[in-house]
Image: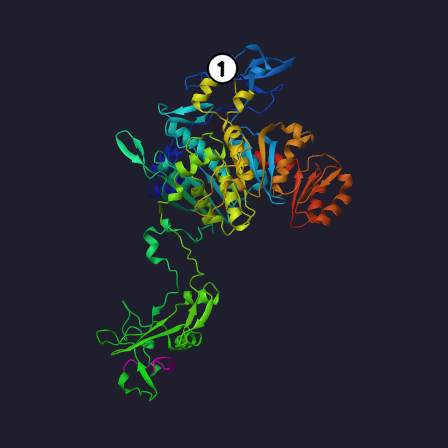
Amino acid sequence: MQAQDLIKRVSALSPELGRDLASYLGTRRLGLVYEESKPEYVRLWNKPVIEGDLVNVLPPRGEAEDLTDDADKHDDIWRVAKIDDGVARLVSAEREEMLDAKVGDLVAVARFDQDIYCGLRETGRVERGGEKPYQVVINGENFHAIESLLFAYRGKVDCIYIDPPYNTGAKDWKYNNNYVGADDRYRHSKWLTFMEDRLRVAKALLNPEDSVLICTIDEKEYLRLGLLLEEIFPNATQQMVSTVINRAGVARQGQFARSDEFIFFVMIGSGRPQPQELGDDWLGGVGSTVKHDLHWNLLMRTGTNSLRTDRPNLFFPIYVRKDGKAILEVGDPIPLGVDRHSVPDRDDAVTIWPIRTNGNEGNWHISSSAVRKAYSKGYIRLGRFTERGMAISYLPAGEQRKVDDGIFPLIGHRDDGSVIVDSDSYHATYLPTTVWNITSHDATRNGSNLIKSLLGGRKFSFPKSLYAVEDSLRFFVADKPDALIVDFFAGSGTTAHAVMRLNHQDGGHRRCICITNNEVSADEQKALVGRGLRQGDPDWEKLGICEYVTKPRVTAAITGLTPGGEPIKGNYKFTDEFPMADGFEENAVFYDLTYLEPSVVSADLAFDEIASLLWLRAGSVGPVITHRDDYAVADAYGVLFDTAFTAPFMRECHKRNVDHIFVVTDVDTEWRRMCDEFPGRDVVQLYKQYLRSFEIGAGR
């Protein structure tokens, strides 16, 4: 029940109590209740520090930073008043105090609730897929990266797959620049705030007509996550699956060993899992219901409503030729009060009535006209004569469609005229139960060990099984060969790898956008600080998740070579087996998230870092328009920089039949003119619509 509904009902009984309740609930929420723990500031590591920025002053090299909840962060916020010869004059944001510091000792910060404008800077690419669209890896703060995708993909994403931090208390994730440990009394509230912020932006990315959000979690937060998902996606269909990831179990002192985790499927609009052809591991409790041949039902009804008196219109004679090889006639139903023995027999046939084993008169499953039609098509099968008559079978409507549609190819007819089909060519498809105990989903063998093979021995903590992610996606995108998938907790890049596997299996052009960061582990951070290094230093950055694992893993999967240039050893298993050294015919591009000043964007001085966002919006195919000229038209989109060249630009766009058109202009009439010229196409006014996308991004 919504709070306003409750207040209304109470007020109808007692206006005074209603007012008191409204006052009490004014600052409270019903449902999932927790104390929001918003970070006041967020660091923008990739932003060059300029005059006017808010900044933190980093501690001297070799000293660890105090990032505990008790640290006075307000005293750490400074505004850059002036920069001269690499030295910044800083003014305290909270006190009347000034400070000089080297620009290299500063990191830009921004209030969490302010608008942040992002771009992309390419850091490399791999190309083996010809004209296929590119898989994309973005290194950056995932909240800002998701917001940047809103410009390109609002309401267009088919599937979001995420494996967020599990909040185990083992310092496996950072919040407000600090690792969150088990002793943090607000760690659950921090985790929920962290997740809610990102899920609300993710909701805006998903196609409201047909999409799915897939989210994995373990027992530490699954209850809170389930409530949070119901709150954010109230109109979606939500289901949770338990999946075994380690059959041996992970020992926990004084507790049962954990062998499984959970997967939430949030199905939006018409989004639903589609039956798939699955291996024996999947059968479980549904094994007995999976049919690998046509299923013939007895024509005589059994169970409830199976007496003549229950369905009088389904009591009629069937005249079978005396050799039992053909039906000569199907009679009409006889009235309930008429004795069947009064109905004359045929000299050349045996009369078959629906008589039950106890001698009672029963009824047939289908009408006399339906029997005639089914028999004419070979969908009635005759048994042997018995004392009670003959067992006659028929194909239900669904089974008939399998023959009509060629799922079971027709190869002949029996002596009685019934169809003979090729069952060997049929592969059963079905949906499994909500308990998955699948050999290929073992996270050690097909996650950790797989990464070691791909990356020449490099390790990554707790990666997903490649095949577990592949299977989860398959239920929702197998019938969408051009699906767009987003993972904003990409980690080692398993989702991108799984998408490429799916493409390999059916020739699809699915795209994956993976968002990760370049964090190091808590232990690595301590060691690096001890060496006098800071985030941003090359020796620090090369050990971060994105640089050390994600980008090399995607590259290795495509090329079939380890980072050291050696062919990857081993084969892909289970579905679609082939040597990993073969790689994939795919393309991939890597980006760092950058931060932009809106005034610089509006002045058309930041196109280089916005260019890739335009390309993403146009489908991430073909070349990226990077050069600024009067206008430029690529395979999938065009950019008009100077409206004086509108006429030739429009001619070229028509000639190439591009679907995405970007117009750099502050004049609305120029943009509307282009909309009129290209009705039904994606016509974008730069940089107004780009800036507006970030301003309305998360509704902060």
Which quadrant of the figure contains the N terminus? top left
Residue in the foreground of this view, choosing between 563 and 417: 563
Q: Nearer the viewer, residue 76 or 562?
A: 562
Query: Residue drawn 43% across and 61% down?
Result: 424
Tell whether 256 sits left or right of 601: left
- Report whether residue 668 is seen: yes
Is 613 above or below relative to 357?
above
Q: Looking at this view, is 401 or 179 the one in front? A: 401
Main SS, magenta residues: loop
Q: Which residue is mark 1?
A: 531
The structure's colour scheme is rainbow
Name which quarter of the figure residue 66 lies in. Answer: top left
What segment is highlighted magenta in the picture? 323-337
| 446 relative to 324, above or below | above
Q: Is residue 623 magenta?
A: no
Residue type at mark 1: give it. Answer: Arg
The secondary structure type at the circle numbered 1 is loop
